[in-house]
Image: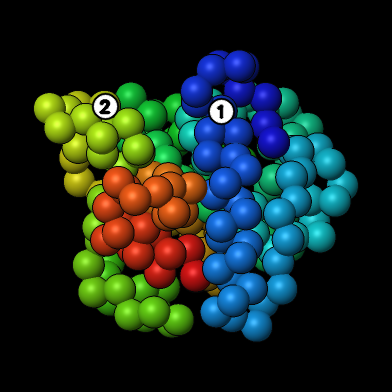
Amino acid sequence: EYTGYQEGGLKNWYTDYPAMDNHVVAMLNRVTNIRVAPVKVKPGDPRLFEYPLLYIVEPEQMMLTDVEVAQLREYIRRGGILFLDDFHGDEDSQPVTEILNRILPGERIVDLPMEHELFHVFYDIPKLEQVVNDGLVLCRTCDQWENGESGKEPQVRAMLGKDGNIAVLMAFNNDLGDGLEWIDHPDYPVPMSVFATKFLS
């Protein structure tokens, strides 16, 4: 959970909650030896350090205090990974970059090439697919991306730690959460849910 700009709106930490969380937990428990449970933690909560990965949806909405920023910096320093999903185009990229510059000042954001081991560990992912929200999928006349031309091309970005490992992982111009949230819906495209499942594994 985080404090967001649009409390009570469509864009916030709870955008795909709880369906996405429940589906990804069931999937990971089924196909891996990792035992996970859906747990919500807020920045500032000391329990944050008990979890190796924090999934954050709509990260451009985050309003973090200096104390919360410092805690997330320490979380990453201890080996935790922030995974940011569902932000699109220049409109969302700018506030996300500003947030990350507060957490990891001086570190740069890089694009991960498809040769990176991330795409070839559990599943082999040869190319990126764009996963979109259910509203766009069901709208036959809508663009199948968000926030204009700069939201067209899916990318995987990262900030790397001193050891070269991923500290922050970003699914930019993608909505992997919706791929899992709507996986049981008969009208949601199966290829999008399959890609989201592989990526999130």
Q: Is residue 126 left or right of residue 140?
A: right
Label 1 element class? loop
Q: Residue 3: x, y in percent?
A: 67, 25
Image quarter for residue 31? bottom right
Q: Residue 15: x, y in percent?
A: 53, 33
The three-letter amino acid code for the residue at tag 2 is: Asn
Q: Is residue 27 visible?
A: yes
Q: Is residue 189 left or right of residue 82?
A: left
Image quarter for residue 67? top right
Q: Residue furthest front?
A: 186
Picture residue at 71% right of the left edge, 66% below the top: 36
Q: Residue furthest left?
A: 141
Picture residue at 64% right of the left edge, 73% below the top: 29
The three-letter amino acid code for the residue at tag 1 is: Asn
Residue at the disc numbered 1: 12
**Of residues 60 and 190, which is closer to you in this image?**
190
Q: Residue 198: x, y in percent?
A: 40, 69
Q: Residues within 10 Å of mark 2 (few under 14, many from 20)?
A: some
Mark 2 or mark 1: name the one nearer the start of the chain.
1
